[in-house]
């Protein structure tokens, strides 16, 4: 805890002035010159580290990687020194540049442009819950030194021939890239950290624990080796681009360069702490987050959709669409059936895409940091990178999935075959150029496609932990089945087509509502992720 | 004796005529009377040719009267058939060409073979009674044909065509119902995509990422070494400036007219 030399009150880092400020007397101190008065004492009890607050003596337990926190009793900002001393001490820090008010403004702007966001997201009381966090990051320095070779050519016409001159192009490269940064906390989703990136490396300062005063902070639990290839790739891509755009080579259309100079070497890896503001919105057992880059102010939000507002908004939007359609579109009842079938398939495709995105998010399939930590703990400390997604393994997994669901797959294939065989052949014979007879084929195609999508959606759903059934995909298939059967029967009266389309419309509505619910799942995360007890809401 | 023989012969002949006359099939339809009317001021015709025998004589006359106002704009024809080996639309067009060529007019056919009604128009009438209106009118009247009220069906068709030609509107419930349902579905899909797109935060591009780094890249000793030459024979294409292969003047072979129909 940092104390004011004038009055002895607690000091916190003040963002606008970038100094340590005393809340009591307003005195300002340089973060690098102020000395820490006291730390939270700690002791181990079983698997829990117990910290004693230096201000009130209250005991706070911490089982995670927290480096700075707040006393649950008195709210005093406390640095947990044992977690950031010695080898674990970060080398650099980017201090907070954006204040809580900046975050609120950015968030309000985001909510305003998001359609159908729940009203409570604009409640000022809710917005006041922004919390400042210092997240651990790995910062890499990559060098390139050596020769680079590539090929080029230049073509021109002379008479009846096209001549092509071939060239070998070479050069020497001497490059350094500093500041490639990746989050080092397994609880900070890579997808989110990529969205609020980049942090400007020109703002990096030497680390001082004083900067942490008044904020939460985490320590790194992801090994630095996880992102080495990503950092190298950034440097190599830039060198490749620079070689290709070299004025001496440009006219020769250089191909992909190779050589020693193209290989990036990591000369240095530093740990750092970068600022993030976050805000939580809780609904039932899921939490939505907003993350704001504490340096640049870039915001990334989980935005759920309010279903009631969504439906009302759709009804209102349907009016101008209806007027527009009347101006240029003329559909017969059978034509409408075909269009409805196609739209049902489209909704089923979007549904499946959403299911896949949810599966990736819920299983952290693309979160390298999380996967590295989990596979390390599973294998007893040995770090492994993200799971192999090579074609061989994907094929093997697909085979296992099919085996597990063989009953369902066989049933669907037989059903589709019977319907197709006994319907399509007579229909193929009697198909003419008339648009009145075109809907059975269209209906069959849509039904087959949505059937396949339904099966795949069911398979995806099984991979998602604690998921609900893919109702939307099943209902979309039922809708296209009804459309196909109506087209096959081909009744004279239009009323049957309208009734079928209304049924398909209801099915599509269920699909879209389920899709919106699934999208809300996509926009939220399971508890807990950043649940921090107590806490200073001043920041 | 001769008198008796003659009387007997006459009686026998009469009996034979009565018997066979009653079983002779109604091929009289093939010889159904074609009623027509010609508008003396415009030269357009109205024709009623009930080959399928759906209308009575009175109804045919009445229908001809109903068709007369159309002859101010073009020719009009009503045809019924029960032996059509092609599609109803093809039949309607071919009959129209046979009667009226490419002139302005309308033809309404009730095809008992395919169980379909069809309206074909061409010329000036087609500019008003286009394919959409033809389909709408068919959709409005097909129930009459389903209920075997063929005169009412034809009468309503020509009444609606006359209304359109006189500048009035006709009911198009099918169009509005279809567009209404489609509008709701499209609105739901549109709002879903809008809500997803607008709430998304874009990942930074390459330029933004590179601008945040401290980078230094020196490229020196650039050398270009010629290694060889290849050549490919590729004579320039001999494109004529005369527009060879173009369409003949007058754009021959165009398809005019159109229509719409409905099963019953």
Image (cartoon, coloured by chain):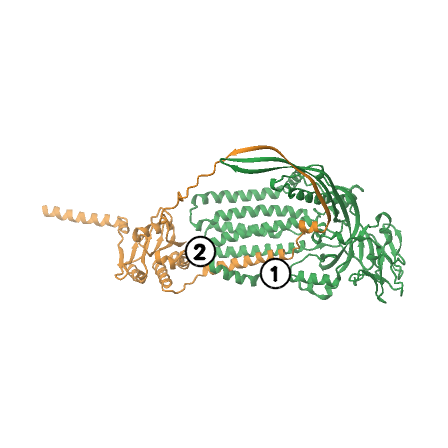
- Chain identifier, colour orange: B
Q: Residues within 10 Å of mark 1 (few under 14, many from 20)?
A: many
Rendered image: mark on residue A354: none
- Image position, residue A202 (x, y; %): 75, 53
- Single out the mark in the foreground, 1 or 2: 1
In the picture of the structure, the residue carrying the numbered disc 2 is A493
Q: Nearer the viewer, residue A230 or A68?
A: A230
Q: Secondary structure at mark 1?
A: helix
Q: Earlier in the sequence, mark 1 or mark 2?
A: 1
Q: Secondary structure at mark 2?
A: loop
Chain letter belonging to callout 1:
A
The chain whose colour is green is A
Q: Which residue is mark 1?
A: A310
Left or right of A79 in this view: A103: left
Residue A490 in the image, given as x and y percentages of width and height = 46, 51
Q: Quadrant of the C terminus of chain B?
A: bottom left
Query: Are the residues flagged by discs 1 and 2 from a single subunit?
Result: yes
Q: Position of residue A535 (x, y in %)?
A: 80, 60
- Which chain is home to disc 2? A
**In the shown orientation, is residue B20 left or right of residue A512?**
left
Residue A119 appears at what percent x and percent y?
67, 64
Q: Disc 1 to disc 2, how far (Cα)?
A: 34 Å
The residue at 43%/45% (across/down) is A430
**Front residue of this view, candidates A289 and A33:** A33
Can I make out residue B151 in this image? yes
């Amino acid at each position: 805890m940092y104390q004011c030399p004038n009055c002895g009150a607690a000091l916190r880092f003040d963002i606008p002035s970038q100094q340590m400020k005393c809340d009591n007397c307003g005195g300002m101190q340089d973060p690098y010159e102020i000395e820490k008065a006291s730390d939270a004492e700690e002791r181990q009890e079983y698997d829990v580290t117990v910290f004693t607050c230096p201000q009130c003596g209250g005991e706070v337990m911490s089982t995670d990687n927290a480096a700075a926190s707040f006393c649950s009793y008195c709210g005093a900002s406390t640095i947990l020194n044992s977690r950031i001393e010695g080898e674990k001490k970060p080398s650099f820090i980017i201090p907070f540049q954006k204040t809580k008010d900046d975050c609120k403004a950015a968030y309000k702007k985001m909510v305003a442009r998001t359609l159908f966001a729940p009203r409570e997201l604009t409640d000022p009381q809710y917005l006041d819950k922004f919390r400042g966090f210092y997240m651990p990051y790995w910062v890499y320095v990559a060098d390139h030194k050596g020769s680079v070779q590539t090929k080029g050519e230049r073509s021109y016409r002379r008479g009846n021939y096209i001549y092509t001159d071939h060239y070998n192009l070479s050069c020497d490269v001497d490059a350094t890239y500093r500041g490639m940064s990746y989050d080092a906390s397994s609880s900070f989703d890579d997808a989110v950290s990529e969205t609020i990136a980049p942090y400007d490396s020109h703002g990096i300062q030497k680390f001082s624990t004083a900067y942490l005063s008044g904020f939460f902070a985490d320590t790194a639990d992801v090994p630095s080796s996880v992102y080495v290839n990503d950092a190298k790739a950034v440097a190599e891509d830039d060198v490749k681009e620079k070689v290709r755009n070299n004025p001496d080579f440009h006219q020769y259309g250089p191909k992909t360069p190779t050589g020693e100079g193209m290989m990036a070497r990591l000369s240095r890896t530093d740990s750092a702490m970068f600022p993030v503001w976050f805000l939580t919105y809780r609904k039932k057992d899921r939490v939505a987050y907003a993350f704001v880059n504490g340096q640049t102010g870039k915001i990334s939000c989980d935005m759920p959709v309010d279903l009631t507002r969504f439906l009302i908004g759709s009804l209102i939007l349907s009016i101008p669409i209806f007027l527009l359609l009347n101006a240029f579109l003329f559909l017969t009842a059978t034509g409408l059936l075909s269009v409805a079938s196609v739209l049902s398939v489209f909704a089923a495709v979007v549904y499946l895409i959403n299911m896949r995105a949810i599966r990736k998010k819920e299983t952290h399939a693309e979160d390298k940091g999380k996967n590295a930590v989990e596979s390390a703990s599973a294998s007893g400390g040995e770090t492994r990178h993200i799971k192999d997604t090579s074609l061989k393994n994907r094929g093997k997994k697909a085979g296992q999935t099919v085996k597990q669901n063989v009953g369902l797959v066989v049933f669907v294939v037989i059903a589709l075959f019977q319907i197709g065989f006994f319907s399509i052949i007579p229909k193929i014979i009697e198909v003419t150029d008339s648009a009145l007879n075109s809907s059975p084929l269209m209906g069959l195609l849509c039904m087959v496609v949505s059937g396949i999508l339904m099966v795949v959606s069911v398979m995806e759903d099984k991979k998602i932990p604690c998921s609900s059934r893919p109702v939307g995909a099943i209902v979309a298939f039922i809708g296209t089945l009804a459309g196909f059967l109506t087209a096959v029967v081909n009744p004279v009266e239009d009323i049957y087509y309208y009734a079928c389309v209304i049924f398909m419309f209801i099915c599509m509505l269920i699909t879209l509502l389920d899709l919106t619910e699934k999208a809300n799942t996509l926009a939220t995360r399971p508890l807990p992720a950043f649940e921090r007890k107590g806490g200073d809401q001043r920041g | 004796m001769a008198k008796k023989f003659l009387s007997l012969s006459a009686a026998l002949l009469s009996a034979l005529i009565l018997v066979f006359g009653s079983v002779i099939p109604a091929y009289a339809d093939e010889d159904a009377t074609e009623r027509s009317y010609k508008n003396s001021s415009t030269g357009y015709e109205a024709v009623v040719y009930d080959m399928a025998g759906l209308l009575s004589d009175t109804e045919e006359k009445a229908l001809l009267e109903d068709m007369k106002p159309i002859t101010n704009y073009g020719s009009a024809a009503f045809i019924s058939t029960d032996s059509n080996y092609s599609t109803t639309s093809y039949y309607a067009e071919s009959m129209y060409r046979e009667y009226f060529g490419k002139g302005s007019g309308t033809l309404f056919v009730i095809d008992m073979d395919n169980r379909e009604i069809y309206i074909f128009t061409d010329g000036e009438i087609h500019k008003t009674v286009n394919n959409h209106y033809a389909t709408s009118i068919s959709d409005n009247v097909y129930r009459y044909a389903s209920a075997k009220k063929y005169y009412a069906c034809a009468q309503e068709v020509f009444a609606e065509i006359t209304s359109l030609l006189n500048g009035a509107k006709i009911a198009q419930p099918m169009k509005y119902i279809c567009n209404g349902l489609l509008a709701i579905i499209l609105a739901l899909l549109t709002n879903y995509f809008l809500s997803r797109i607008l709430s998304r935060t874009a990942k930074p591009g390459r330029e933004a990422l590179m601008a945040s780094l401290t980078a230094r890249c020196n490229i020196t000793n650039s050398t270009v070494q010629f290694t060889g030459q290849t050549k490919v024979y590729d004579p320039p294409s001999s494109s004529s400036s005369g527009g060879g292969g173009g369409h003949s003047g007058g754009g021959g072979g165009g398809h005019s007219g159109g229509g719409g129909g409905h099963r019953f």
